[in-house]
Amino acid sequence: MIKSLVTGGAGFIGSHVAKHCLAMGHEVVVLDDLSGGFEDQVPEGALFVQGSITDQKLISALFEEYKFDYVYHLAAYAAEGLSHFIRRFNYNNNLIGSVNLINEAVKHKVKCFVFTSSIAVYGQGQLPMREDMVPQPEDPYGVAKYAVELDLKAAHEMFGLNYVIFRPHNVYGENQNIGDKYRNVIGIFMNQIMQRKPLTIFGDGTQTRAFSYIDDVALPISMSVNKEKAYNEIFNIGADQPYSVNELAQVIGDNFGVQPEINHLRARNEVQHAYSDHQKAHTIFGLEDSVLLSEGIRKMAVWAKQVGARASSEFSNIEITEKLPQGWEVKQKEVVK
């Protein structure tokens, strides 16, 4: 029996990857600290372990007990904009936690380490983003992701650890945490509509993203271990067609039968336009055309209506309060000293 570890498997992308791994006949262990995921999203048939990738002793014990063939590493705090203000938290979770997994993967001769990176590694002005470009990340989240990519390359060259790196972007769909106000604009918009609140848009809403439905991302991630040509390669995955945030707001409003009220907040420091080239992934994985935004939003809206609105949680470990984007202000007592 093939044994796979899926970190972040109670979260959004991870729960879908775990489901696909089970369908491929893998014995799946899900590790998640439930900071952004939900236990009821762990697919039936997977063994759930609640814990953090920053817990080195726990990670070592899991590898020793289960002798994993494959590692799918999706656990991360994926908030690019917020990462400027939670630098220590960002690097502990997204970099040091990843290194804990890589160390054990090397020690236990894991056959392949699948890592979910991000197009945040590219930075500004490289369009369309291609895998042969030199990354120039502009936020701590992208810096951490790129550092893990480099560490995997070094681990392969030194110890022979095979890896596959994916750079998805702006993923949305069922199981997304719509109660997180710091990330995932589609979930934020749906949650605001269901609470009869105006949609909050940073700046004028002309910034563009190629919003990617979950099926276009989770399937190639899960099947990558079966594609030897994918080993030790990097792939952009996701939708091809970019849309402005203003256009997105209208599509979501249409699916909820409302004309959304827009509240434009002060522009924040972010990449204005982001979309990537996916020819390499299409060649290796034989992917069909990506799900249209209108169809993906329709599917997610049906799910969101069933789940209902969720209270937006405050991130309580803000380390730097200077220049926090509008709406992200925190009470003084919540500031980490």
Image: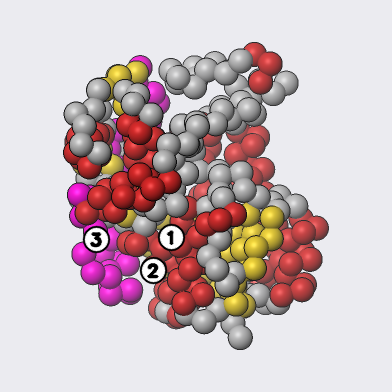
- Which residues lie in the magenta part? 266-294
70 w.r.t. 213: above or below: below
Secondary element at image label 3: loop
Type of amino acid under label 3: Ser
Q: Are marks 1 and 2 in contact (CB under 8 Å)?
A: yes
Disc 3 marks which residue? 290
The image position of residue 327, as x and y in percent, is 45, 19
Residue depicted at 43% across the width and 66% down the height: 221
10 w.r.t. 320: above or below: below
Type of amino acid under label 1: Phe
Residue depicted at 73% across the width and 21% down the height: 337
Pick whichever, 180 or 64, lies toward us.
180
Disc 2 marks which residue? 220
Q: Is residue 214 left or right of residue 74?
A: left
Type of amino acid under label 2: Pro
Q: Earlier in the sequence, mark 1 or mark 2?
A: 1
Label 2 Cα neighbours within 10 Å, binned few <14 / some 14-19 / many ≥20: many
